[in-house]
Amino acid sequence: MGNSVKQLAVLGSTGSIGRQTLEVVRALPHKFHIIGLAGGKNIDLLAEQIKEFKPRFVYCQDREAGSHLVNAECEFLSLEDIARQPQVDTVVMATSGSSGLRPTLAAAKAGKNVALANKESLVMAGEIIINEAKLNAAQILPIDSEHSAIWQCLRGETQPAAQLILTASGGPFCHYSPDQLNGVTTEQALKHPSWQMGRKVTIDSATLMNKGLEVIEAHWLFNMSFDSIKVLIHPQSIIHSMVEFIDGSIKAQLSYPDMRLPIQYALTYPERLPNPQFPKLDWGIINNLSFEQPDFDTFPCLKLAIEAGRKGGTYPAVVCAADEVAVELFLWQRIKFIDIANLVGQALEQHQAIAHPSLEEIMAADAWARQRVLKLASGDSSC
Amino acid sequence: MGNSVKQLAVLGSTGSIGRQTLEVVRALPHKFHIIGLAGGKNIDLLAEQIKEFKPRFVYCQDREAGSHLVNAECEFLSLEDIARQPQVDTVVMATSGSSGLRPTLAAAKAGKNVALANKESLVMAGEIIINEAKLNAAQILPIDSEHSAIWQCLRGETQPAAQLILTASGGPFCHYSPDQLNGVTTEQALKHPSWQMGRKVTIDSATLMNKGLEVIEAHWLFNMSFDSIKVLIHPQSIIHSMVEFIDGSIKAQLSYPDMRLPIQYALTYPERLPNPQFPKLDWGIINNLSFEQPDFDTFPCLKLAIEAGRKGGTYPAVVCAADEVAVELFLWQRIKFIDIANLVGQALEQHQAIAHPSLEEIMAADAWARQRVLKLASGDSSC
């Protein structure tokens, strides 16, 4: 295994996780070959990546622009078709938002290793994806730092965990009062204290929605009940999460906040490889790690997401979709920061949920929630 | 494996680790049977333990008193003979000091599981014990909380660690100046801030000698170079140690300081079992974990032990024996606290070391060091 070259398809290669994935590939050129690249709106960057990595399969959102990218050596395919190509060993799901759902499912059905950074797909359709992965012997390898930490702590353990403890930086507004939150700007919300991430996930970190979605993701990835998943605020973002075992022993995984480490771990697993680009923790500098309980009242998105996860059915899809639209509206400065939670909460209240939904029912709930939030934001609160 | 009853011989059953081992056995009566008990000077407690656990093999230091303890159902044997009895599955080495060396070696030669709390045996004769354990397929299962933490963090990892980080509470005199240390009393030194332990190891924690010996122990247990073992002061004693892997990822093991957890882990390994007596970490209370670099100048024992470990040969045996006598002298109030390091340092300087020593050469170095410290303490500094 150590000597074979893994064929990677990176879906979402121009985003934050995609770019960092390619950094890992550059650092370990003997380990990986890029066979597929799919980018979003940044056509120039995608063109550069294609020039550098010479993938066989290419996709971009803008089909017109995409047609200029393909050449005699590469083929334009849909995300799902790239994910299921027989030559692909590992699909890196680095797209953001619900667009990752269908390609993740395609990869699971094709029995691929799925290095998953797109949490929305598991949140929206965890039951379907996990079942397909089991049926087709696909491995879901988490890339989120928290889930990678839990996965690393569970390594070699033969019994189920007693509790997962997901750490959260608390975001830039950790000790803000409701009044202070009322006045925060998009600029303030986009400044995360410890992580460099994409815009959507940065806002989700500020509302703690991100942590709520991660709780749902952990529920599916590690087959743990919601009662056994706790959230703990840890502002330094050094401990990325912890696992408590049935004897009360706890294991934690630590590193500086750098997404390339969990990305590489997922790609090289079960091997670990040195990477000189990764900063080593310096215990001459780190003299304090602090912890506090999350404030569910000031950050209602956390509660909304966990409650939606507990209820299950189409509720988590509604949280995802409603949040995606609400965050967009906030980034466009159309709504206030605190309105993100208000809009998601209203959408959830008005939703007629379906238990154990099909993919079509999930996508219908997603579409409904998007419309609903747009209507609610424009002042129309009728169901 | 989960259903078989393990036959335990507890050597040092009346000491701190021995008593806590029996607490674990009481909590999990379906898992263990006590087949051997060996106590020190506390004959009354040993008699009670014999009455409760009805072992087949018994030993106590005072042979005369021991003859009153045996009855028709149990036999008086030496520590080594108990360790090598064919019916014994696991030997818990809970004696303190160098008296643990020969029975540990006997257990290793007999291919037993050796749940090892007696660090002196590995410090004095690590090379011999580890080689015998390999030859005879004996498993050395660490009970020291630091080494148990490392062992738990290494679980399931298939590649060597890059670095071990042994945490240390720093003891009761963590930020004392040399002047302050000069005046500390035995009462002050016997008050450890976070651990309840025997008297010898409590003093060793105050001088940091204990941590130095643990570095040597870790070197042998985990086959790590001294350059790859670091010591980090962590006053709360919640993180019991950490392992850094070659990709820079670090795993840590956490719990309240309670020796019963590492004892139970060693006894039930690879299984983990719930034990309602163990306190669970309460993250509503723990809000801060702090770290600092050790002060090698103020606590010279730490440096002396690690240097002796690096030099190898009979030096580590001299550190152990010299320290054992020096601590006794301090407990009898015959020398000052700071004289412990002075005496150990002088004994090391005067020692004519032997590389790759035999057991006899190690025991000779041990005897020499004991005599030397007594002489030095009485004012005789001639070699």
Image (spheres, coloured by chain):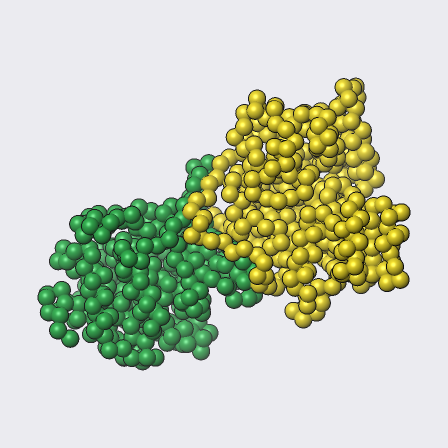
Chain colours: A yellow, B green
Q: Nearer the viewer, residue B135 or A305?
A: A305
- Number of labels in the image equals 0
Q: In which quarter of the view is residue B74 placed?
A: bottom left
Q: Is residue A142 visible?
A: no
Residue at image coords 43%, 37%: B285
Left or right position of B258 against A348: left
Residue A102: image x %, image y %?
Answer: 80, 46
Q: Is residue A375 left or right of residue B156?
A: right
Q: Quadrant of the N terminus of chain A?
A: bottom right
Is B18 placed above or below B128 here? above
State the image coordinates of residue A7 (x, y, percent, origin top left).
75, 63
Residue found at the far left of this picture = B379
Q: Quadrant of residue B302?
A: bottom left
Image coords of residue B177 (percent x, y) = 24, 49
At which x and y percent is residue A32? Answer: 71, 64
Q: Quadrant of the C terminus of chain A?
A: top right
Picture quadrant of residue B350: bottom left
The residue closer to the viewer here, B251 or B227, is: B227
Residue A178 visible within the image: yes
Q: Residue at x 83, y 52 (%)?
A: A59
| Residue at 43% over, 55% down | B241
Look at 64% across and 48% down and name the residue there: A144
Indicate whether A371 appears above or below B128. above
Q: Is residue B109 left or right of residue B14?
A: right
Vertical arrangement, residue A327 with respect to residue A229, above or below? above
